[in-house]
Amino acid sequence: MVISLGRTLYNLTGRRAAGIAKAWPARPPGDLIWLHASEIGCSRGLRQLALRLVEELGVTVLLTCPEEVPLTNGMLLQPPPLDTPAEAKAFLSHWAPALAIMSEGELRPALLFEAEARHLSVIMVDARAPFLPKERDGWYPGLMRAALQSIAQVLAVDETAARTFRRAGAAEVAVAGRMEEPSAALSYHEPERAMLAGLLATRPVWLATDVPAAEEAAVIGAHRSALRLAHRLLLILVPQDPARAEVLAAQMEESEGWTVAQRSLDQEPHTETEVYIPDSTAEYGLWYRLAPVTYMGGSLLGEGCARNPMEAAALGSAIVYGPRPGAYGLAFGRLGAAQAARAVGSPSDLGDALSDLLAPDRAARLAHAAWALASDGVEVTDRVVEFARRVLDGPS
């Protein structure tokens, strides 16, 4: 009776919120697996999973996400269906998925109950905590527990998440960790790396990425402070606006007395060079490989971090970042939880962090933890692909 009341209330609010559903494109022939991301931050691991499902199982993958997501081959992208009984029936009838894979913890009760009625297997991956869609949040007695019991398997990111799902009513919960994400390792030109590495020899190097004008003084101040401890230290400074390179070089040469080399002028970072300014943002695969420490520009005083910190993590550079993660809050949260990045709150903190990480062993510990985080998840994705294979093969 309690479950019935919760479902009734949920369905009533759904009718009030319902609009006109968009027409769906024609369903392609063959097996189809449905993946759902509640927001774009959840989609990265799902996109890598989609690639594996298409390549290894030969299926079409339908991804539903409220935001635009880059597609891989064999993928279709659609907005999520309205979570009402009528829409759930129409959606599942049209797409006829062989398996549904949800992520993070978003529950769509109407779809889950309809899937259960059709004997459609649903699993939850990268599970952190169960929640209803933002537009449908509210008090519905017994609804979440009933919806969770419609899920065949919950793969939680850690033991804390697993306990949360068990307390909420999930029947089958396993601690699996996060799924693999597409590699953030950027390409580079090896002869160029070897040449620059030869010029730098054993010099300590740090990189400041996509630095906005508002942070230039902070980066310069941090370099000035660190030079007192390591007079051979080289800063690779990539301005967010490449047109700032000439002005920056003149400013540092005049006010700091530093020797500045500009890549746009075919200058190289020789022994006496304190700052090297690349002429574009297109060679980060090279700079991450040369710099043991990277400051993620825009995260301190800018409008938010301008680059994915997993790029640096995947190439073994220790990460320093400020309190403004921009679009990469989830990535920084994971790095922070794994003690794989150094957070700073002010320009003086940036200088202190840089000086501390000049000790190779400290930078190496941070970089290794970040690399391990950027590289994990393959086993979880393997597990989901194997589950999908068994579903497609049917009962033995």
Image (cartoon, rainbow, N blue to C red):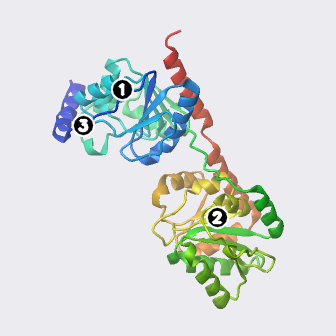
Indicate which label's residue lies in the foreground, 3 or 2: 3
Gap in Å between the C-alphas at discs 1 and 2?
Answer: 45 Å
Residue underneath mark 1: 95
Residue underneath mark 2: 294
- Neighbor class of circle 3 (other Cα within 10 Å; few <14, some 14-19, many 20+) is few
Would you identify the image quadrant in which residue 231 lies?
A: bottom right
Secondary structure type for disc 1:
helix
- Neighbor class of circle 2 (other Cα within 10 Å; few <14, some 14-19, many 20+) is many
Indicate which label's residue lies in the foreground, 1 or 2: 1
Residue at the far bottom: name it: 254
214, above or below 334, in the image: below
Q: Residue type at mark 2: give it.
A: Thr
Residue underneath mark 3: 21
Q: Position of residue 65 (x, y in %)?
A: 39, 42
The quadrant in which the N terminus is found is top left
Residue visible at 52% across and 77% down in the picture: 213
